[in-house]
Image (cartoon, rainbow, N blue to C red):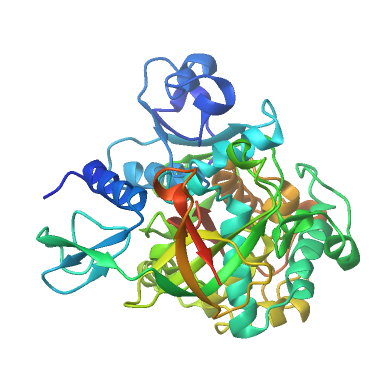
Amino acid sequence: MAEKSNQDIEAVYVGQLSPDVFENQMHVAPGVPDYLGLGHIPSTRVEAACASGGLAVIQSIINVAAGYKDTVLAIGAEKMTSLSTPEVTRALALCADSDYEANIGVTFPGAFAIMARAHEAKYGTNAEMRAQVSVKNHKNAVENEYAQFRKEISVDKVLNSLMIADPLRLYDCSPITDGAAAIMVVPWEETKKHDGPKMKVRAFAQASDTVALHDRSDLTSFNTTKIASREAYKMGDLTAKDIDFVEIHDCFSIAEIIAIEDMGFVKPGEGGKATINGVTARDGALPVNNSGGLKSRGHPIGATGVSQVVEIFKQLNDMGEKRQLQDLNIGMAQNLGGNGSTVAITIFERA
Amino acid sequence: MKEPRRVIKEYEEALDANRIIGSRCECNDIAVPPRPICRKCGSDHMEFIDIKPKGTLLSWTVINIAPPSHTDKAPYILGIVQLEENAQCLLGTVMVEEPYMGMPLGAEFDEGEVGTRRLRWRG
């Protein structure tokens, strides 16, 4: 990955959930080369609910790795604020199983609330532990000029906020956001011709699971995160211990707790305790969502997976300014779609 | 193999007749709602069977902020119900005052609704 001009771009992958519902526009892929003046190059939209951006990155990597194109642009974007909150809730609920879930009034906060309650019953992961995820991510976002909320919050504020889907409250949930992010993928040899910032793709993986939550055997973890992480570690000849920092899909506070367990950073059931103990804080052993995460950086659905990779790019090139972490070599992103029906994992290393 | 949309329709029609049905594969794996292809072995030799309308509550939520289709019903409880006869779970509307983990539930059917919206779990 390196700096290039737009005239060098040979293909585009656009990660976007729903330009149709949000903006009354389908067929957005050709609109990217059209409006960016890139000519007649191929452009493809990738949709995997909230993992659309992560898959745009993975498809771009696969394209370049296959030797088909040499300069591929991965873009993620979503324009959500054009609709009211109930309309956005409905649009997102379309990512659940329409016949068996959305039809009886399931929402995504509701699906994650069911998992939060199951996790609490099995492991004692309580409201204070979940709240600490949001408190940490709000604190981290203060130093991110691209974040939606650059304001610290207290545990009490989370615990006293509006109940959305019991036991998840407003401040357990990521917000509705407009946003976009992009990254360029090129063959490694190409980067040597440029002086600009760069990083190396170390590994990637993707996994799928049932669309409906009730078809899962375990309500306290995501098969997709576990499988994709394991495959990515194998591809990169890595273990969880080799990862220096991670950007995680904290669409809801409980999702970050489950993810650090599923990715092998802590044992199952210990994610809440690790969060309370500061393990995942900026100055902790494993900084998680140093950017502010979805909770505070914002969650423009299709953009999220790409913006995670952009954050890793900045950190690995010491461009993190006031939130720059030290002694970094390897960064990892976990991008989760729907209630975990799709997960995209990418791992990068310092060039 | 039965066409998937047809399988969903048969499930909904069964609910309209106050029955819960599932599919049983020749490998004996049971799926509720029924499936056209077995998730365990990949076979499409599926038999549709009646499922006992009883289960226990595995986990639940109270939806306070609902999508536009359900705002007039909020707050409402949605839970994952583990069916009595097999390991399969089902998401459903739970009509109890104070739900708890492991609560025994029985299915009832709302005469004013059709398809999957008819199913109600009560303590």
Pick whichever, A125 or B11, lies toward us. Answer: B11
Pick whichever, A214 or A200, lies toward us. Answer: A214
Pick whichever, A108 or A332, lies toward us. Answer: A108
The location of residue A298, given as percent across then percent down, is: 70, 45
In this rendering, position of residue A220 left or right of residue A327: left
Counting every numbered tag in the picture gives 0
In this rendering, position of residue B107 left or right of residue B16: right
Q: Residue at x 62, y 81 (%)?
A: A121
Q: Height in image: A172 above or below A257?
A: above
Is residue A35 visible in this depiction of the protein?
Answer: yes
Pick whichever, A294 or A329, lies toward us. Answer: A294
Q: Residue at x 45, y 50 (%)?
A: B118
Q: Residue at x 65, y 66 (%)?
A: A254
The location of residue A237, given as percent across then percent down, is: 39, 73
Quadrant housing residue B35: bottom left
In this rendering, position of residue A248 left or right of residue A339: right
The location of residue A134, given as percent across then percent down, is: 77, 61
Residue situated furthest front in the rendering: B111
Is residue A351 visible in this depiction of the protein?
Answer: no
In this rendering, position of residue A131 left or right of residue A220: right
Q: Height in image: A173 above or below A146?
A: below
The location of residue A323, given as percent across then percent down, is: 78, 57
Q: Height in image: B46 above or below A119?
A: above
